[in-house]
């Protein structure tokens, strides 16, 4: 009985560490004002790609370990500590889905456009200008420097404007 | 890509150039190059759409029927301030390339064409107004617009004419004409098209250039040369 309790605790701890690494490692590597090396960036991106699913599996495993540990552990504070640990694993599963970059720089959900002659934009403002299949489109740079990305369609052609 | 529309989101940063991720495949793409760097489409390349960086007034005069992106009202307060480019000059960089006496945040016009990469100091191009140079073995012409902010790059050849065009700037510029070429005496506008003279209606071939900080241009163009250096 004692041995199996330790197994559940170790499983829970492993899930917690695994999920924490999945969330923290990409955030640590891919952050502004820090140089990124090619290999660490590649590793961080692989972790980012799979962490959504991986942290969900980890959370399910943690909850399963908690469900097995709870009846086997008579000491109340240890039960609570295990529950907190499992809860943290679930929190990491949620955090793994949050794009912190889009919290800082909100995307444009639905871009709208004004005719050139009707826009109130100052003449001295800089724009990124494209001509796609004869249709002209301009993206003001000061706004683009905030949103960074605009998924757009000019006529029938899908483009993405970036800055 | 391959007939599938991709929807991109900001996903990270790589030495101060951002990374984006598409919803459809989960692939990560580098903004400056349009190259997929991780994920199912790794190694694939987005097609670059030729673009200019112009003042709105210049663009509107050329494209009165065009459309311009509206501000998003709830985020306007977060948009870059008028002097954002001055403020950016004070921001540190995480990588530096102290070659050719360049500073990390020197603003460059970078050209990657004809098998070569070459960078031009933006402020110096504006000062010169007309720059004749080469990228690889090809002659190129950099022209500053009348707004003294916009710059375009052309192949320095008039289609069908072997002689060097020897463009020079009209002083003062005429309405709708900025340059004249020596062989034919035709006048050319900022779009690189002849508006009068023997070559009227002929347009020079555009060469794509991007405006970028030296450290970023150099990071992705390690073999770049620099005009004047």
Image (spheres, rainbow, N blue to C red):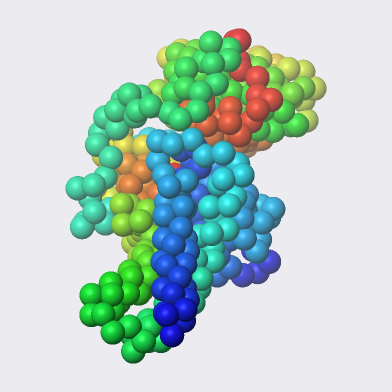
Task: Give left or right: position of A153 versus B45.
Answer: left
The one nearer the camera, A14 or B159, is A14
Identified at 64% across, 30% down, the residue is B221
Task: Give left or right: position of B81 versus B190.
Answer: left
Identified at 36% across, 87% down, the residue is A72
Quadrant holding the C terminus of chain B: top right
Identified at 43% across, 47% down, the residue is A28
Of all residues shown, which one is farthest toward the bottom?
A71
Q: Position of residue B184 (x, y in %)?
A: 68, 20
Task: Give left or right: position of A118 versus B194.
Answer: left
Q: Position of residue B59 (x, y in %)?
A: 41, 40
Identified at 43% across, 28% down, the residue is B93
Q: Position of residue B26 (x, y in %)?
A: 55, 65
The answer to whether A85 is drawn above or below residue B138 in the figure is below
Where residue A76 sits, quadrant-wise, is bottom left
The answer to whether A18 is drawn above or below residue A145 in the figure is below
């Amino acid at each position: 009985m004692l041995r199996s309790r330790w197994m559940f605790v170790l499983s829970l701890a492993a899930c917690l560490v695994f999920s924490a690494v999945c969330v923290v490692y990409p955030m640590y590597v891919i952050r502004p004002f820090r140089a990124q090396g090619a290999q660490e960036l590649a590793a961080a991106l692989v972790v980012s790609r799979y962490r959504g699913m991986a942290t969900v599996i980890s959370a399910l495993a943690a909850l399963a370990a908690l469900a097995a540990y709870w009846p086997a552990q008579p000491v109340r504070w240890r039960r609570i500590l295990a529950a907190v640990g499992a809860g943290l694993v679930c929190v990491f599963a949620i955090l793994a889905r949050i794009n912190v970059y889009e919290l800082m720089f909100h995307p444009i959900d639905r871009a709208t456009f004004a005719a050139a002659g009707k826009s109130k934009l100052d003449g001295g403002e800089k724009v990124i200008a494209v001509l796609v299949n004869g249709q002209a489109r301009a993206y003001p740079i000061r706004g683009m420097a905030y949103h960074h990305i605009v998924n757009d369609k000019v006529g029938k052609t899908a483009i993405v404007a970036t800055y | 890509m391959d007939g599938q529309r991709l929807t991109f989101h900001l996903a990270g940063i790589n030495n101060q150039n951002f990374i984006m991720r598409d919803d459809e495949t989960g692939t990560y793409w580098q903004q400056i190059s349009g190259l997929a760097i991780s994920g199912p489409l790794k190694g694939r390349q987005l097609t670059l759409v030729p673009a200019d960086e112009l003042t709105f007034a210049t663009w509107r005069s050329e494209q009165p029927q065009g459309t311009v992106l509206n501000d998003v009202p709830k985020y306007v307060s977060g948009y870059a301030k008028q002097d954002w480019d001055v403020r950016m000059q004070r921001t540190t960089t995480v990588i530096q390339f102290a070659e050719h006496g360049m500073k990390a945040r020197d603003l460059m016009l970078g050209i990657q064409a004809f098998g070569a990469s070459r960078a031009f100091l933006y402020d110096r191009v504006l000062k010169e107004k007309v720059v004749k140079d080469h990228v690889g073995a090809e002659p190129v012409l950099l022209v500053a617009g009348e707004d003294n902010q916009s710059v375009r790059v052309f192949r320095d050849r008039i289609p069908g004419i072997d002689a060097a065009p020897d463009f020079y700037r009209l002083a003062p510029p005429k309405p709708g004409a900025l340059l004249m070429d020596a062989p034919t005496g035709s006048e050319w506008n900022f779009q690189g098209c002849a508006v009068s003279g023997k070559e009227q209606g002929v347009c020079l071939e555009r060469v794509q250039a991007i405006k970028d900080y030296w450290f970023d241009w150099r990071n992705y163009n390690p073999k770049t040369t620099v005009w004047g250096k």
